[in-house]
Image (spheres, rainbow, N blue to C red):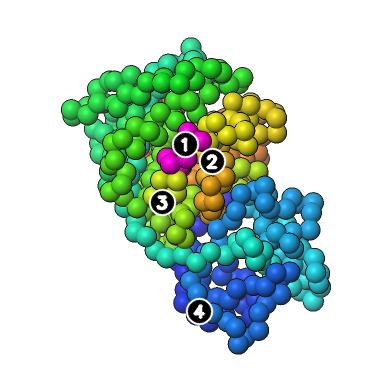
């Protein structure tokens, strides 16, 4: 279950039928034909030699697992795909096996197609982490110690092309590096706490961190922006190999890393193409004020509480037309139910065995020694 799946690059070939394309739909890009509305393939004469990827629109424009998805061509649960089953009908399924009774082709919404023209954009990484001194909890935090060890050993975010550390305080990290301090300019760092963890909802602080990233400008030197939680063991070279095979549309993408949930952008590893991150920065203030997002209440009228920064970033990008790409093999996360073994599905304290995992990120490892042990185990087993 935990073994790393090889991320497939796109291929260049002419596909003459929809069924031929299905097997390539999970690749980073493919050259094929546009699908007509209603899931009908265009005739061979109209086949275009295009390099495209699957990049899905916001979940609100996709069908639920109980609806016919023929008109939308996408599903609102991450990891489900819209497959044509009967003539004129389609269902959201985890997978589909073609047979005499179901074609398993993937319909397209012409007005908002899942397929997007795309091209390679480069693979350099700007990586940042955030150390929070005032967490709101009485439990000890080892974030700073973990970040210090990363710097001392030149691993984690400090093995990226560019890196920075932000915090609610200015503190020495090591070797002359200090955290970049952000101020509570809008008075929303400490407006609410999480019921289970007792820590502050972090969207207010992260909105100032994102602005500090923008002010620093270092991220502009890279092709991808990556936020890494301090308690996530991170091997940047593995992510580099992944993004090298990923084409990007002109309006950018972000990588959903948890499947079979409604919102799959989990915060242990947040990966944005640079254009996508620019879009977040340009619309940050508007998104914080947007009644459509309403981050202080949260989705489903506050059922899960205020939005954390990962969900806020996702909904802001969705609102402004940035597409999402499924990337379930970039992270093995105990917080993602689909990443847990079958006998641990309900164990929210589960952690991966790092000697068995070769994903770019593994999470959570909140104590310094267990973080280092995980890093050593995965590198010994699979290399960096």
Where residue 177 sits in the image (x, y, percent)? Answer: 22, 29
Q: Which residue is drawn at 64% across and 72% down?
A: 35
Cα separation between marks 2 and 1: 8 Å
Is 169 contained in the magenta span?
A: no
Question: Where does label 3 land, which residue?
Answer: 275
Q: Residue at x 53, y 64 (%)?
A: 116
Left or right: 286 as drawn, with respect to 95: left
Crowdedness near tag 4: few (<14), some (14–19) or many (≥20) residues, C-alpha within 10 Å: some
Image quarter for residue 9? bottom left
Earlier sequence position, callout 3 versus callout 4? 4
Please give the label number shown on residue 49: 4
Q: Residue at x 27, y 20 (%)?
A: 171
Cα separation between marks 3 and 4: 25 Å
Left or right: 184 as drawn, with respect to 342: left
Please give the label number shown on residue 284: 1
Mark 3 vs mark 1, foreground winner is 1
Q: Indicate whether 310 appears above or below 20.
A: above
**Magenta part of the chain:** 280-286
Q: How many numbered marks does the figure carry?
A: 4
Tag 3's secondary structure? helix
Where residue 99 sits in the image (x, y, percent)? Answer: 76, 74
Mark 1 vs mark 4, foreground winner is 1
Earlier sequence position, callout 2 versus callout 4? 4
Question: Where does label 2 land, which residue?
Answer: 316
Earlier sequence position, callout 2 versus callout 1? 1
Earlier sequence position, callout 3 versus callout 1? 3
């Amino acid at each position: 279950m935990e073994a790393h799946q090889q991320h497939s690059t796109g291929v260049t070939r002419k596909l003459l039928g929809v069924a031929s394309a299905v097997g390539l739909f999970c690749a980073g890009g493919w050259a094929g034909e546009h699908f007509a509305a209603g899931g009908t393939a265009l005739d061979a004469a109209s086949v275009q030699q295009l390099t495209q990827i699957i990049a899905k629109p916001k979940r609100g424009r996709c069908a639920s697992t109980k609806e016919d998805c023929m008109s939308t061509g996408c599903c609102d649960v991450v990891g489900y795909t819209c497959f044509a089953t009967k003539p004129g009908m389609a269902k959201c399924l985890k997978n589909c096996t073609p047979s005499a009774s179901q074609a398993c082709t993937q319909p397209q919404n012409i007005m908002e197609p899942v397929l997007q023209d795309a091209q390679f954009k480069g693979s350099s990484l700007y990586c940042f982490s955030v150390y929070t001194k005032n967490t709101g909890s009485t439990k000890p935090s080892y974030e700073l110690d973990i970040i210090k060890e990363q710097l001392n050993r030149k691993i984690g975010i400090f093995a990226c092309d560019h890196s920075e550390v932000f915090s609610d305080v200015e503190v020495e990290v090591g070797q002359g590096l200090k955290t970049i301090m952000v101020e509570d300019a809008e008075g929303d760092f400490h407006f609410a706490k999480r019921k289970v963890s007792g820590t502050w909802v972090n969207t207010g602080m992260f909105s100032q961190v994102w602005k500090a990233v923008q002010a620093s400008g270092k991220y502009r030197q890279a092709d991808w922006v990556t936020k890494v939680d301090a308690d996530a063991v991170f091997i940047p070279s593995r992510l580099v190999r992944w993004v090298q095979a990923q084409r990007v549309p002109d309006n950018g993408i972000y990588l959903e890393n948890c499947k079979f949930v409604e919102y799959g952008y989990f915060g242990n590893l947040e990966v944005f193409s640079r254009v996508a991150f620019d879009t977040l920065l340009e619309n940050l203030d508007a998104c914080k004020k947007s009644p459509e997002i309403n981050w202080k209440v949260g989705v489903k009228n506050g059922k899960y509480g205020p939005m954390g920064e990962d969900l806020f970033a996702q909904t802001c990008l969705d609102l402004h037309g940035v597409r999402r790409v499924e990337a379930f093999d970039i992270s093995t996360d105990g917080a993602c139910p689909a990443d847990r073994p079958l006998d641990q599905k309900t164990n929210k304290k589960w952690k991966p065995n790092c000697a068995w995992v070769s994903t770019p990120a593994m999470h959570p490892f909140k104590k310094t020694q267990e973080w280092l042990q995980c890093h050593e185990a995965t590198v010994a087993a699979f290399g960096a």
